[in-house]
Amino acid sequence: MPVLTQLEGTTITGTVDSPVVTLPPTSVLNDFGAGQSFDGYRVQDDETGPATVAAGEFLTPVIDEEPLPGTYLGSGILSTAGLRVGNPAGGLLSPNLGLSAQINPVGVDYFRDGEGNVYFISDAPLTADRLLVTVTVKLTGLPSETLTVPLSELNDTIADLDPTGLLVPLLPGVDDLAQSLLDSAVISTTIDADGTLELPDGDFEVVCFAAGTLIDTPDGPVAVQTLRPGDLVMTRDNGAQPLRWTGSQRLSAVALARNPRLTPVRITAGALGINTPSRDLIVSPQHRVLVRSRIAQRMFGTFEVLVAAKQLLSLDGFELATDLAEVEYFHIMFDRHEVIRSNGADTESLYTGVQALRMVGPAARQELLTLFPDLVDAGRATLPARDLPQNRMVRKMAERHQRNACALVG
């Protein structure tokens, strides 16, 4: 499970092709923020899923099911200078008596969130039992010993390598060597902009409609795959609105098997309320549907909220569509985030803003930036069509609806 560790006070300078990370006076473990383990990433790319993320591409770690949108900056190495404890007698006993140790370099990936905070992404927490140290000990008359051990075991290892019991009393500071390594300054490094982040299978999610979904237009329901930019679609708040952009992605059986997080959610007819949807609706797990109920009003202060389909899987009528051999997903986007009718249910369009860039591949991303140049500003405020409650609160809301036998759309 990957770990995200914030680097407070870190700055990124240089160009996109040659960025440089500069750390403040920082020592290993002592100054790093606590690492946060997370389950995966929310991105989208080609039909086989985004196996690789390159520098400058959008990346969204999902921590406790809450996304942290940002940008992948490249790979790098976390390392410290080596420490040596020498012979305090100035060579009177033996010029070879001594010990050296260095924390092994750790490969990391750099990530910056939308507010400019910089993080390490590592395979394991940066803790004393995870960081490895290479230690070399030289005692008079004995061959040198070189071992690689966890930092937390360093002092015990030195004691095991000193059967004579001479090293510790002769070399002041040996007892504090582990702490000295913790206090060692981290060396600032140049980010490798050519570095890439390999995403584990199943560690990313998408937001879109499945092919065959009927979208309400002024001329009646139209299959989503036939819609094109400029076509008018009926919206809940602003009447008929022209589509600004459409996109698609096909996931094969192999891709779905490799990436189970992409398995669509089937919302069966009537699962949201009376005749809502009017026929089974297939959406990606993160696609939001509209909930309108008194329970929503009591919990969130508004009758209508948009919630991800995957957060409703505990309810009757919501299930993973594991029977589908493959799925083709479609995005539709307006000038703003809209609520539209799909198979008779109110659902969201692609959210205008940084999220739109996270959900598509490089070619489509460039097209979106041409249409919406303001999207390049990651801090640009974008208003959702409805409130978007946190996922954990949505699950509580679902439990209350089930417990009270209350429809999600009343």
Image (cartoon, rainbow, N blue to C red):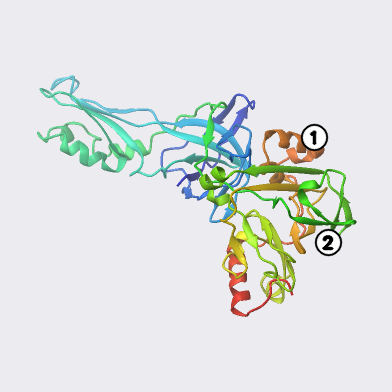
Dot 2 corresponds to which residue?
236
Q: Nearer the viewer, residue 57 or 326?
A: 326
* Label drawn at residue 342: none
Tell me whether the residue at label 2 lies in contact with that at label 1, contact meaning CB atoms closer than 8 angstroms: no
**SS at mark 2 in the image:** loop
Dot 1 corresponds to which residue?
370
Q: Amino acid at mark 1?
A: Thr
Give the Cα distance between marks 2 and 1: 27 Å
The image quarter in which residue 134 lies: top left
Q: Amino acid at mark 2?
A: Arg
Name the side, left or right, on which 26 lies relative to 157. Answer: right
Q: Count the marks: how many?
A: 2
The image quarter in which residue 44 lies: top right
Q: Residue 403's x, y, as percent? A: 59, 78
Asked if residue 195 is positioned above or below residue 408 in the image, the reply reads: above
Front of the two marks 2 and 1:
2
Q: Nearer the viewer, residue 254 or 245?
A: 254
Asked if residue 264 is positioned above or below residue 111 in the image, the reply reads: below
Q: Residue 123's x, y, as percent? A: 44, 41
> Between disc 2 and disc 1, whose residue precedes?
2
Can you say which quadrant of the picture contains the C terminus? bottom right
